[in-house]
Amino acid sequence: MEIKTILITQARTGSTRFPNKILKEIDKKSLLEIHLERLNQCNKISKIIVATTIKEDDQLIYKKAIDWGFSASRGSELDVLDRFYQSVKDENADWIVRVTSDCPLIDPVLVDEVIRFVQERDIDYGSNGLIEHFPDGQDVEVFKFSALKTAWENAKLLSEREHVTPYIRNNANGKGNNLFTSINYPCAADYSKIRMTVDEVQDFELIKILIHKLGTKMSWQEYTDFIISNNLSKINDDIIRNEGLLKSLKKDS
């Protein structure tokens, strides 16, 4: 029987640091459209769902996703774990892939590689970010639907509800617990200082340069090498990685 793997990308217009960032355009295409077009090249995905919020401003994201031929759903703005679960609970999915829409240049080949790596080993949760060696903006998480359901039923902390997967990671063997198995998809070198995500205006400026110089069809490694050889990381290397999660963890305590 064919494995059903559904990719969910979370998307909203609300951002304290850079409002409406995913609808900002480069050469008449929004970052969200570039992101979805790249993900549409994945071979191991059965379906892509854009999970946005019930806020009035995010009706536009829902409409655009549908107009472009993707599935979309609307749910809680802050309880993103619930938004994720509600978007996929009736899909009979075996596996879930989580990415975020502020990563316009996410690499579809890398997404497929992480999916294959995790599924072949039958691990509950796998990611290329448990050890952060890939550039920020190339993060892929792959987990069983059963793990998502368990997290949805049991997660209590703000950080666990707001960021979808901390409950799974915190209760996995990688953290010395036994509720889930977890594995990291390794990177050949440490590129953690490279940013291809869009949290701030400087990030957007860097993505603009990459797209103007290289287009939207290159691999993560080609974009990374270009950033390094042209010393472009100085544009946005003062921004803290995973700042949103760090803020949530602070509120937990």
Image (spheres, rainbow, N blue to C red):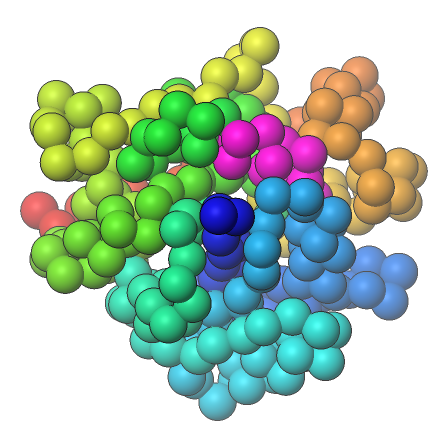
Q: Where is residue 15 in the image (x, y as percent from the top left)?
A: 47, 65
Query: Vertically, is 224 above or below 12?
Result: above
Say which of 174 and 136 sits in front. 174
User: Which portion, as a residue range, is magenta?
Assistant: 105-116
Identity of the residue furthest to the bottom in this view: 56
Say which of 140 and 60 sits in front. 140
Residue under the image location 65 percent in, 70 percent down: 70
Query: Vertically, is 176 above or below 155?
Result: above
Q: Is residue 247 visible?
A: no
Say which of 216 and 247 sits in front. 216
Identity of the residue furthest to the front in this view: 1
> Would you say residue 146 sits in the magenta stretch?
no
Identity of the residue furthest to the top in this view: 188
Q: Position of residue 216 (x, y in %)?
A: 83, 45
Residue under the image location 29 percent in, 61 percent down: 81
Would you say 67 lies left or right of 199 here? right
Q: Main secondary structure of the magenta part?
A: helix
Q: Is residue 8 visible?
A: yes
Say which of 159 and 183 sits in front. 183
Residue under the image location 57 percent in, 80 percent down: 62
Figure label count? 0
Q: Position of residue 198 (x, y in %)?
A: 60, 49
Query: Vertically, is 228 above or below 18?
Result: above
Would you say 115 lies left or right of 43 here? left
Quadrant for residue 130, please give it.
top left
> Would you say residue 112 sits in the magenta stretch?
yes
Q: Position of residue 27 (x, y in %)?
A: 89, 60
Would you say 77 lies left or right of 36 here? left
